[in-house]
Amino acid sequence: RLEQNLITEIPPKAFSPYRKLIR
């Protein structure tokens, strides 16, 4: 998935707010 690829690029700290954006 393209979304998963982006998450892998960004750090875990940014993953918290990033997940909120996807939702």
Image: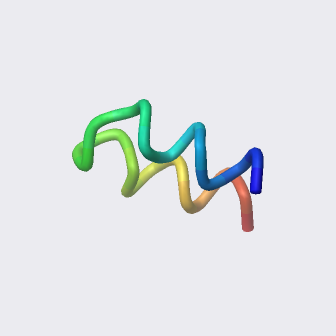
Q: Which residue is drawn at 71% across and 50% down?
A: 3
Q: In this view, does 15 lie to the left or right of 22?
A: left
Residue 9 sits in which quadrant? top left
Please, is residue 21 above or below residue 23 in the view?
A: above
Residue 22 sits in which quadrant? bottom right
Q: Which residue is drawn at 39% across and 50% down?
A: 15
Residue 10 spot, x, y in % from top left: 39, 33
Q: Using the image as rendered, state which of residue 1 and residue 20 is in the foreground.
A: 1
Q: Which colour scheme is used?
A: rainbow
Residue 1 spot, x, y in % from top left: 76, 57
Residue 6 spot, x, y in % from top left: 58, 38
Residue 2 spot, x, y in % from top left: 76, 45
Outermost top residue: 9
Which corner quadrant holds the C terminus?
A: bottom right
Q: In this view, does 18 lie to the left or right of 16?
A: right
Outermost bottom residue: 23
Please, is residue 8 above or below residue 10 in the view?
A: below
How many numbered marks, from 0 up? Answer: 0
Please, is residue 14 above or below residue 12 in the view?
A: above
Q: Residue at x 55, y 60 (%)?
A: 19
Q: Which residue is drawn at 23% across and 44% down?
A: 13
